[in-house]
Image: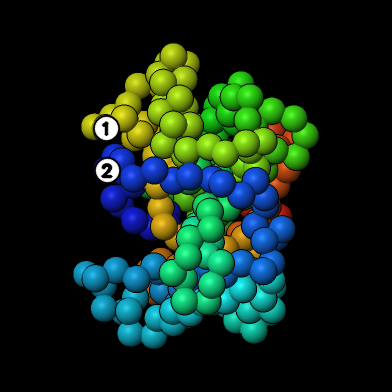
Amino acid sequence: MEENNSKKIVDLIPRIVKLLNWLEDCNDLFMQLIRNPAGIGFPNEELLETKIHCDKSVIQVGDLSRLLVAYPQDNIWRSCQLFSDKLCKTEASYVPFFLDIDNSKKNLEYAYSLTRDCLDLLGEIPQFQGLDRMRVVFSGMKGFHIEGKPTEIVDSQVIRTTLLRGLKRMGRIPIDCSNYFQAGVIDPIHDFIRVTGSINSWKSNNILLKRKVIQLSVDEFRRAKIKNILEKSEI
């Protein structure tokens, strides 16, 4: 979840992508959902307003589009882990593989350049080579998600390590910890991620701001300027 500052902490728990699918290809599986009213961020123990009206539920992946219609203004996150049962006791897989790339100062030019470098590096990894293996999602505020459909089972932590080494070779020097660079933070370790097609809304000086979380092909992303992406995301 991009709001969680703990992204800078190295998480050693493996994130295994066993199902080689996009999310929309997993209609019969289940996922956990978290919803908050417009302008309210991800639940945080230190911020009471993020917990008062928070709604947690479990739905089938195939019902996600209907939920987006039912709650068009809410901030919505979904679990990266999918489950084969409604009680979420049987883990299926993390679907798809993803990276969350944010710039805490909301410098989207920086976040864009870091995302572009990650795409280049992922393109060198055999499991992500070929057509329809990667796509990009603009999260609506601080950065981008890279989603990947690998050709075989992958461990996100192994891919993460490969990417971080590659970024260092490209001249990006980590700050404080291995996944935190001047251009932003990169990580695949979260339990929840913002839902593509939902609204990312937040408050600035008591003014409600919002953009749509939009999906881009790799080619669209590489051709686009930040202003184009923002225009496409405007509501």
Q: Quadrant of the C terminus?
A: bottom right
Looking at the image, do the residues carrying marks 2 and 1 touch, with CB atoms under 8 Å apart? yes
| Residue named by callout 1 | 177
| Residue 169 percent coordinates (x, y) | 44, 14
Is residue 167 visible to us here? Answer: no
Task: Sort mark 1 into few (<14), some (14-19) or many (20+) by Cα contacts within 10 Å.
Answer: few
Q: Is residue 16 left or right of residue 130?
A: left
Q: Residue at x 67, y 52 (%)?
A: 22
Residue at the extreme right = 131
Sequence-earlier tag: 2 or 1: 2
Is residue 47 visible to us here? Answer: yes
What amino acid does circle 2 point to?
Ile
Q: Residue at x 63, y 24 (%)?
A: 126
Residue 162 lies in quadrant: top left
Q: Residue at x 61, y 67 (%)?
A: 29
* Front-most of residues 103 and 156: 156
Q: Which colour assignment does the render follow?
A: rainbow
Residue at the extreme front = 90
Against 170, is 95 above or below? below
